[in-house]
Image (cartoon, rainbow, N blue to C red):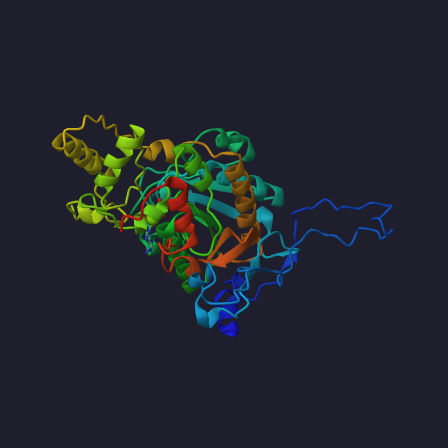
Amino acid sequence: FQEDWDKRFNLPRITDIYDLKPRPTTFSLKKNRSPAGDENGTPMDKWNGYVNSDDRALLKVIKYSSPNSAGAECIDPDCSWVEQWVHRAGPRKEIYYEPEEVKAAIVTCGGLCPGLNDVIRQIVFTLETYGVKNIVGIPFGYRGFFEKGLKEMPLSRHLVENINLAGGSFLGVSRGGAKTSEIVDSIQARRIDMLFVLGGNGTHAGANAIHEECRKRKLKVSVVAVPKTIDNDILLMDKTFGFDTAVEEAQRAINSAYIEVPFTLDGEYGVLRHLEHLLKIKGFCVVCVAEAAGQELLQKSGATDASGNVILSDIGVHMQQKIKMHFKDIGVPADVKYIDPTYMVRACRANASDAILCTVLGQNAVHGAFAGFSGITSCICNTHYVYLPITEVITAPKRVNPNSRMWHRCLTSTGQPDFH
Ligand code: ATP
Ligand code: MG
């Protein structure tokens, strides 16, 4: 298992298929030299600030003494003794591209998420620090690669300096239209050497397909992703940028966990009965419901969006109607207001902690590309910044276990009964 783990988490690199000589990095780290040395009098010029390729971070740090310890249910028993090391992110001493010759492109796909502009901005800054002169933005997601009339946008520090002050994406986003071979044709025609892809699970699947196709064609292209989701539903990571902001913006415990927990409206243990109880004791109540929750209660439209994702029916509208009807039926006057915060949550600018996360993830994406990695994603695991192979994070969405402590904490902090 240990061998299997190490192999799975080994990062794909362009040197796997080409015989390339590295060159010393041009990313300068100010040396922390002090003539006086540290308190032991040792000169501190040994510090160079670069990450070595053998540096790893440990994914799980708890040793469960028993399989029924809280949290142990998430661990595959066969793997419990495997040391789950992942590659540390950061600048390398040696790089595989000549910065002056590099053309780098940035694309944002999928839905909007706070922090996209922060990441774009940091990628541009860091590329310029390496000495890259040719940086472009691909407008409106993967479509920007092949749709007529969409022109690539030259990017520079000057242009992106203040884009973090606004929400949304400076480059625009889109869904659908991802024909990998056409995208790679376009990458080839535009002579792109590094592609930075910001997006969710679909975008990551696309980025990995682009990486594979570039390999097949023997193109020296580094494809590096930065995960973006307000739902925090990507495997292995502590959190994705935008999540904190979204939670803060929604002002309530909008927890994607609700998606996993089935509930009923009617009956003794249904939501309506609980609302009756709350109205009686408090005179008001707030219901937070995730947009994908309770789909089995709704009529399926069968429709899909441009990316092929199933369009979910609106549970909020449905619940509002049901609740109104119920209180009318039982003769209790109740005023039911429905607020859909989707764009309030998605299109605002990142808060301070997300802005910091975006800064580091964006910088590390550039370091990863220069180090010759491709088909990787830049993220935070167990409080450390790391690179993961995209293949490991797109196998399934991260789910909340309704028997876990996390879910239990959610119930105890909201006072919500377990409806299922
Ligand atoms: P969000 O979480 O906001 O939905 P997402 O990245 O999952 O973000 P999608 O619209 O599903 O958003 O996908 C974004 C882009 O990735 C689209 O252009 C889509 O065509 C492409 N894509 C999705 N799935 C795949 C896949 N399996 N292979 C290649 N490309 C894909
Ligand atoms: Mg998605």
Q: Which of the pair 336/27 is nearer the observer?
A: 336
| Residue 402 left/right relative to 63 | left
Q: Please say if 164 is above or below 216.
A: above
Which image quadrant is residue 15 in? Answer: bottom right
Q: For residue 240, say whether it is visible.
A: yes
Q: Position of residue 345 (x, y in %)?
A: 38, 34
Which image quadrant is residue 235 in? Answer: bottom left
Q: Position of residue 101 (x, y in %)?
A: 56, 49
| Residue 36 left/right relative to 18 | right
Q: Which of the pair 238/125 is nearer the observer?
A: 238
Q: Which of the pair 226/381 is nearer the observer?
A: 381
Looking at this view, name the residue that lies furthest to the left. 329
Q: Which of the pair 97/49 is nearer the observer?
A: 49
Q: Position of residue 407 (x, y in %)?
A: 39, 50
Looking at this view, name the residue that lies furthest to the front. 281
Say how many tags the image has. Answer: 0
| Residue 171 left/right relative to 357 | left
Q: Please say if 68 is above or below 233.
A: below
Q: For residue 314, say whether it is visible.
A: no
Q: Position of residue 12 (x, y in %)?
A: 50, 63
Residue at image x 53%, y 49%? 365
Residue at image x 26%, y 49%? 309
